Image (cartoon, grey):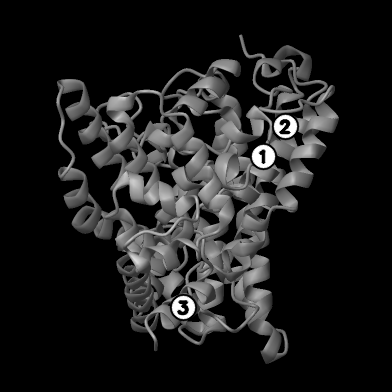
Amino acid sequence: MIDYSKKIRLDREFYPSTCIESSIESDRGRILSAPALRRLQKRTQVFALELNASIRTRLTHSLEVAQNARFIAKTILAKLKVDGLEKYKLQELENAFVSTSEMTSLLHDIGNPPFGHFAEQTINKWLKNNALPILERFKCSTNEMQKLKELLGKDICNYDGNAQALRVITKLQRLNLSYTQILSVLKYTRGAFEDKPRKDDSFSYLMKKPGYYYSEKEFIQKIQYALHVKSGHRFPITYIMEAADDISYLTADLEDSVEKGILSLDKVYNLIKKECEEEGESYLLDVIQKRYEQAKKNDKPYQFNMFFTLIRASIVTDLVNHVADVYVINHKEIFEGEFNYALLDFDTKSKYFKAIKILEKISLKYIYQNRDVQTLELQGYAIINGLLDIYKPLLELSSDDFAKLVEDENIECFISMRLLRRISQKQVVAYSNDVKKIEDKEKFEILEWYYRVRLIIDYISGMTDDFALHEYKTLSAM
């Protein structure tokens, strides 16, 4: 039975609200006021360290995703009203359904590091080459300890913006959001410490990337139990956020590439036209042909804006209706969180899927592989690597010495003393709270070090692009 009252609830870690409307408004207020959300305005979407404010940042992208999610959620509700919302216990949860979809989408990139997804790969490579050798020094007296060591080794080498988002929300910012709002952010349902599933696994898509770290495992299990979501399953509203994100990417990067001078309006039109004709795709071809002719009738400075505005309006409306249909048709599987597809990828024979693949192909070939874009990624690689190298001495300390540092006591490593004082106190407190919970004395040394790794990654991945550059220059005496 589909019963949304079991999923959209009042539960939260502290001070739960007494009614669903006040709970939803509380979540909205906490999210919109969060410093971590504001930092997204200085984080890369595609173009790092961009001075042109009209080019998308992680924040402006997230705003667009939130609007798409709101549109999708309202469209789904309109379709479900045909059978009556009472059937799904949604009649008094319409606002909660829409708002949670919108706010989840606003949060979806909150764990992304500076310099975009390339930085995720950079962080993981550095951890594999530098942190794992330190982990190997820990002696294991039992099989249980050896298994824990192996598990933590996997976990620290699987940094991911989705998993980091859960840390930011629950521990670094301590937003105290409702369990409903938190679990809807969990895009992938595999722990970073778990192996990637086989392609024939029933949850191969849902678990293709890490969704949370070992450090948040117990809390995720707790809220899954509270909201009747099985292990490995997804929260239903998460599908909406994912679709809204996918839709937002389709024309946004092309639009920014024209603003940056990488492509021209005519070049974009001709590229799409050529790909559509080669693939025999008529839906997208009809849209761009009509909108291009309309745009060309305007004064030249406005042609570019008109073309993308009109295309976006057409494609977004069509795709929103399409994903809403997919949601309703597969409602039970999606509600249970066992639907092993992205909504946009479910029907690979649809005209919309073909249009999406054409736009993705053009962006990959002509934007992401552009020399200037890749130069910015290489600069980000140097900055992230440089900062991790600088903070590495903190990982080489004994647990006793690091405990003294946290208590502001002097130790022999004078560099580490100065490094720790640069890290945000919120992040240090999150580390201390995790360490305090370690009850097993035998596991203390290895788990304390694991949380120390998390502390360093929390700090560096939480930087904005410009702050990371400034910190790198400052500490490198450049």
Q: Position of residue 329 (x, y in %)?
A: 56, 25
Instruction: Tell me the distance, in whole angstroms, between the alpha carbons under discs 3 and 2.
Output: 40 Å
Element carrying mark 1: helix
State left or right for residue 203 relative to residue 424. Answer: left
In which quarter of the view is residue 303 placed? bottom right
Disc 2 residue type (three-letter): Phe
Q: Position of residue 244 (x, y in %)?
A: 59, 48
The number of numbered badges drawn on the structure is: 3
Q: Position of residue 223 (x, y in %)?
A: 56, 23
Question: Nearest the camera: 56 or 296?
Answer: 56
Of the two numbered discs 3 and 1 in the rendering, the one whose residue sits closer to the viewer: 3
Element carrying mark 2: helix
Q: Position of residue 335 (x, y in %)?
A: 57, 22
- Which residue is label 1 attached to? 101
Question: Nearest the camera: 75 or 248?
Answer: 248
| Marking on residue 97 | 2
Disc 3 residue type (three-letter): Leu
Question: Nearest the camera: 229 or 131?
Answer: 131
Say if mark 2 contacts mark 1, CB within 8 Å.
Answer: yes
| Marking on residue 469 | 3
Instruction: Tell me the distance, in whole angstroms, between the alpha carbons under discs 3 and 1.
Output: 34 Å
**Residue beneath the point at 47% across and 29% down:** 437
Q: Considering only vertical position in the picture, is 220 above or below 332?
A: below
Question: Nearest the camera: 189 or 337?
Answer: 189
Q: Residues within 10 Å of mark 3 (few under 14, many from 20)?
A: some
In which quarter of the view is residue 414 placed? bottom left
Disc 1 residue type (three-letter): Ser
Element carrying mark 3: helix
Q: Is residue 100 visible?
A: yes
